[in-house]
Image (cartoon, helix red, strand yellow):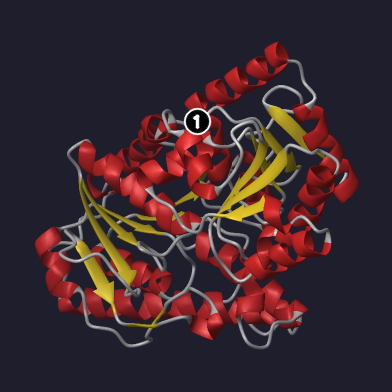
């Protein structure tokens, strides 16, 4: 099968969507499928990429680490003619997501959309952030989903949310799977020595992009409270981003800066080593759609303490493979860390074994099986469209209808956000 993926983030960007696209792409190619990825340019891109088309983009948009594709970019027709895609898979409802709609309609191909992100939690990256803008992003994503033939939700929580918001396109729950073999083994003691962490320390860890939407000041305060009352405790953070300064400030004010260790961005074996240097994984984000870093941590045998939220509750079971907290206070979070730290050795082993078993249920092969089954059911031969032998007039009419659907989707989202009622879905 030839799978076309369009995404607004991709390697070397560090983030959930980029990692998801890379993981699925690797698995599909391993199984003999061809995958063409269309993505923006990013600084320090890999050289000599195979089957990756890069689109010119504005770098570090609004002081973030995101790239934003230019509104006018080189046509892809010749590349797509040579590739002959069977499926178009969009990862976003805007920018290259709109390009995905045009390609799918123009070629008579099924369009799949993965709703990776709660976009309303990220509007602070856009100038003019407001409640109306948050509502607009919700409406845009919902209406975009209804332009697709199939929606992938990364978790049951997000599936239920999309149904509540009015998505009528069929929804399949397809989380990003974890490569168990990538995290099963690591040299934790060596990584501790590298970071200056005592061999007998109790290490609370965290992995991810250090950004405001990840609730990291809360996490830092809760962990600092625990570390301050636990003489052997240290906090190991893997990642980088604008919230690093705020996290360091929390530990500095508590006089614990020597027990906070920030390892930056790590990949492959170094990342596995870092996870194996931890005793426990802490996670406070409430903006996730799935628990990617949680399953990666569990694949390294780590129990997790996390706040109850979408994408998290599907992975963490309270007192089975960690602690899932409904009370969102730093005192409750710190107490949960203490609960794990105080467990007898046998009980802690049981918690870690349960974490490993949970990771196995979220393996990459299982997730790829679900996605590929949906692709097969949607292939043009089974839906009636072929994208071939289309007259020039039909091409023009398809293009006009596609642009109208896109315009109506965007305008309708803006209309709903402002409450004006100017573009209703009942209009033709």
**Residue 75 in the figure: left or right of residue 277:** left
Can you say whether 386 is above or below 389 in the image? above
Residue at 74%, 83% in the rendered image: 418
For disc 1, the marked residue is: 299
- Which residue is found at the position 71% from the left and 62% from the top? 247
* Rendered location of residue 191, percent (x, y): 48, 41
Q: Could you say which is closer to the camera, residue 152 or residue 39?
A: 39
Residue 179 in picture, x, y percent from top left:
39, 35
Looking at this view, is 68 or 87 the one in front? 68
Query: Quick one: 213 or 175, which is closer to the camera?
Result: 213
Residue at 33 percent across and 54 percent down: it is 110
Q: Which residue sits at x=47%, y=65%?
A: 92
Count residues near mark 1 (Cα–Cα under 10 Å), then give few for <14, some for 14-19, many for 20+: many
Is residue 323 shown left or right of residue 64?
A: right
Q: Is residue 156 left or right of residue 113?
A: right
> Compared to 275, does 53 lie above or below?
below
């Amino acid at each position: 099968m030839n799978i076309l993926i369009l995404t607004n983030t991709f390697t070397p960007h560090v983030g959930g969507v980029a990692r998801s696209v890379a993981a699925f792409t690797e698995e599909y190619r391993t199984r003999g499928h061809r995958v063409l990825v269309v993505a923006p340019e990013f600084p320090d891109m890999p050289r000599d990429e195979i089957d990756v088309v890069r689109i010119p983009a504005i770098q570090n948009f609004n002081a973030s680490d995101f790239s934003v594709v230019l509104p006018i970019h080189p046509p892809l027709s010749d590349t797509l003619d040579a590739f002959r895609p069977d499926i178009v898979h969009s990862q976003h409802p805007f920018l290259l997501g709109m390009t995905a709609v045009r390609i799918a309609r123009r070629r008579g191909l099924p369009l799949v959309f993965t709703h990776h992100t709660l976009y309303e939690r990220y509007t602070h990256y856009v100038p003019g952030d407001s409640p109306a803008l948050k509502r607009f992003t919700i409406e845009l994503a919902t209406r975009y989903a209804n332009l697709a033939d199939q929606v992938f939700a990364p978790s049951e929580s997000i599936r239920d949310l999309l149904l509540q918001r009015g998505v009528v396109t069929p929804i399949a729950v397809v989380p990003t799977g974890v490569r168990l073999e990538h995290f099963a083994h690591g040299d934790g003691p060596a990584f501790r020595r590298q970071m200056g962490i005592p061999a007998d320390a109790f290490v609370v860890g965290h992995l991810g992009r250090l950004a405001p939407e990840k609730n990291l000041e809360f996490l830092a305060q809760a962990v600092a409270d625990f570390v301050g009352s636990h003489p052997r405790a240290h906090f190991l953070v893997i990642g980088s981003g604008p919230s690093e300064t705020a996290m360091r400030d929390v530990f500095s004010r508590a006089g614990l800066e020597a027990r906070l260790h920030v390892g930056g961005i790590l990949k492959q074996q170094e990342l596995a080593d870092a996870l194996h240097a931890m005793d426990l994984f802490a996670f406070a984000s409430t903006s996730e759609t799935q628990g990617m870093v949680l399953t990666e941590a569990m694949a390294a045998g780590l129990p997790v303490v996390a706040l109850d939220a979408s994408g998290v509750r599907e992975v963490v079971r309270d007192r089975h493979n960690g602690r899932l907290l409904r009370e969102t206070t730093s005192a409750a979070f710190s107490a949960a860390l203490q609960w794990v730290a105080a467990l007898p050795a046998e009980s802690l082993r049981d918690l870690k074994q349960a974490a490993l078993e949970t990771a196995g249920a979220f393996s990459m092969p299982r997730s790829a099986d679900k996605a590929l089954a949906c692709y097969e059911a949607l292939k043009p031969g089974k839906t009636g469209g072929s994208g071939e032998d289309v007259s020039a007039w039909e091409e023009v009419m398809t293009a006009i209808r596609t642009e109208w659907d896109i315009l109506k989707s965007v305008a309708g989202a803006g209309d709903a956000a402002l409450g004006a009622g100017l573009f209703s879905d009942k209009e033709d």
